[in-house]
Every structure is written in C-alpha cells, then in structure tokens.
Image (cartoon, helix red, strand yellow):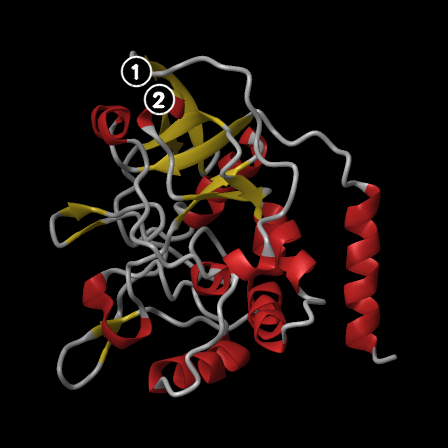
C-alpha cells in the first residue's frame, strides 16, 4: 500500500470519528459589498459550475475579463463556520499589502441550511472514489487547497445564499495600531431575514455532484493543471501564500470570491489570474 493511499485512509478514519459532530447553524462571510446590496439580493453564485476543484483552485471564481486562466461560473459561495476563522481570513488576505487603501469590510452572519456542505470533508470523501476522474479532481482540490479549507473552516453553499438567510452585517475597519481589521459598533439587521432552526448539511456533498470528469481535450485545463502542480493557483477564499489587494478594480468593488489580483498580461492585454508560489 503506497503512502498516498495510507494518507487517504487515515483521513477517512478521522472524519468517521467526527462524523456525528453537529454541523453549524450559523456561518460567516466577509464582503466589500454593502448591506443594501446583500440584503436585497443575497449572495448569488457566479454560475452553474459545481466542480469543487475548479472552485477551490480558482478556475471558476475569476472575472470573465481575466482571460484564459479564469471563468466566473462557480455554483458555490464560500463561507466560514466560525467567526474567528473569518476574522483571521480578512486580516490575512485583505491586510497583507500596503499597496492599496484598506477600505471597510462587512462581516455577514448567515443562517446555514442543507445546501451548505463542509469543503474539506467533501474533498476527502471523494479522494477514494472508484471513479478515477472524480478521485483525480478531488486530489487536485486537496493538494491545492487543503490548508486553506481547514484554516478557514470553510463551507460552500451550492446554488448561493438567499437573502432571507442573511441575519445581519457588521462593519470591520482597519486598525493601524494592531495592523488588523477589527469589528466596529456599526451593525445592520436585515428586515428580510427569516428566523428558523436550521443547520448546514451533516454530510459531504456527493462526489458525483461535487466533481466532474476533466475536459481532457481542453488546452486550458492541461495548462492550468500543470501550472497548479508547480505554482498553486489562487483559490476562491484564501491561500496563505497568496495576497489579495483591497482595491476597487476598474471602478467596481472587488467581490470576496475574486481573490486574485489581475496582474498578469499577455501580448493581447488579456488579464490572467495571478499565480503565486506555494509556501
């Protein structure tokens, strides 16, 4: 039995031990967009691409203007299952550079429902899939984003988050003394919120729903897979080796999912997702 197989079996055992842990009833998401927008529309996904590997390594979370390396079509919206994990995320991701102004961020408190699934358990559950294509996609997500998924206590909402699930928003502002984003007393409640006793799904998303067969004849997928294996790719929530700049891009408020700074240009001026070396 090879070492990789042993690792997968140990992960399966680990999650079987904690399978009875109660899923969260409340999750959190940071976003530059104002409560007026989120309370009206909720968190809509980019599209209908439910491949979690694409989401985790950033292929389905890029702006359409980023060109060949990213398409904005993810069917998922990422959240954190603990407030502490999301606060750590915004201080790490949004505060990692002094190049851009540090604008305020909103932390949204959300009621979790059955369409919220644990990212890490979904990925590890699919690692031992009898379908080699699904197992391959799960491996890509696992090796590219496992540390970030764990650090951020990430859940993904398949199909997005309805506005009735968003309970409130708290403004976070940059503190020059502590060099962190910190909560303010500015809290907005959502009049459209519907209070119910619900929780995230206790089960990982089924492998056949979370991962699809790779497009083997796609030059884009071959190039991206090679690049990912060497450099790692910016993912939809965070990566410890990746910096996201707090800036307004082309007059638009940068969305939380659009994690990578579009700095790579080819001869035609097409912007691509920025690749960073793994730690």
Q: Nearer the viewer, residue 266 or 243?
A: 266
Q: Is residue 11 visible?
A: yes
According to the image, label 2 marks what residue? Answer: 164
**Residue found at x 36% / y 50%:** 257
Give the number of the disc on residue 192.
1
Distance from label 2 to label 1 (Cα)?
5 Å
From the top left corner, tell me how far across and down residue 36 is, in percent: 21, 24
Is residue 106 left or right of 271 when viewed as pictured? right
Is residue 20 left or right of 255 when viewed as pictured? right
From the top left corner, tell me how far across and down residue 264 is, in percent: 27, 74
Q: Is residue 240 visible?
A: no
Q: Quadrant of the N terminus?
A: bottom right
Q: Indicate the quadrant where residue 3 lies.
A: bottom right
Q: Are marks 2 and 1 in contact (CB under 8 Å)?
A: yes
Q: Secondary structure at mark 1?
A: loop
From the top left corner, tell me how far across and down residue 2 is, in percent: 84, 80
**Residue found at x 55% / y 61%:** 208
Q: Earlier in the sequence, mark 2 or mark 1?
A: 2
Q: Is residue 170 above or below residue 231?
A: above
Q: Nearer the viewer, residue 151 or 192?
A: 192
Q: Is residue 184 above or below residue 19?
A: above
Mark 2 surroundings: few (<14), some (14-19) or many (≥20) residues within 10 A: some
**Residue found at x 14% / y 78%:** 269
Q: Is residue 65 above or below residue 18?
A: below
């Amino acid at each position: 039995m090879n070492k990789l197989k042993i690792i997968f079996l140990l992960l399966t055992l680990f999650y079987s031990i904690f399978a009875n842990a109660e899923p969260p009833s409340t999750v959190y998401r940071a976003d530059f967009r104002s409560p007026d927008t989120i309370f009206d529309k909720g968190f809509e996904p980019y599209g209908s691409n439910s491949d979690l590997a694409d989401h985790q390594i950033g292929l389905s979370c890029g702006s359409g203007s980023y060109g060949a390396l990213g398409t904005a079509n993810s069917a998922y919206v990422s959240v954190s299952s603990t407030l502490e994990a999301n606060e750590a995320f915004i201080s790490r991701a949004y505060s990692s550079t002094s190049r851009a102004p540090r604008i305020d961020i909103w932390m949204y408190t959300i009621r979790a429902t059955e369409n919220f699934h644990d990212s890490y358990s979904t990925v590890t559950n699919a690692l031992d899939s009898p379908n080699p294509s699904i197992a391959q996609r799960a491996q890509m997500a696992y090796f590219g984003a496992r540390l970030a998924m764990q650090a951020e206590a990430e859940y993904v909402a398949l199909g997005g988050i309805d506005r009735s699930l968003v309970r409130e928003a708290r403004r976070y502002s940059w503190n020059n003394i502590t060099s962190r984003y910190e909560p303010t007393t500015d809290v907005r409640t959502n009049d459209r919120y519907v209070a119910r006793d619900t929780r995230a799904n206790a089960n990982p998303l089924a492998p056949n729903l979370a991962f699809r067969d790779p497009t083997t004849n796609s030059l884009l997928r071959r190039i991206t897979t090679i690049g990912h294996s060497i450099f790692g790719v910016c993912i939809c929530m965070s990566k410890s080796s990746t910096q996201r700049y707090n800036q307004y891009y082309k007059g638009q408020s940068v969305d939380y999912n659009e994690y990578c700074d579009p700095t790579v240009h080819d001869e035609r001026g097409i912007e691509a997702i920025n690749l960073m070396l793994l730690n």
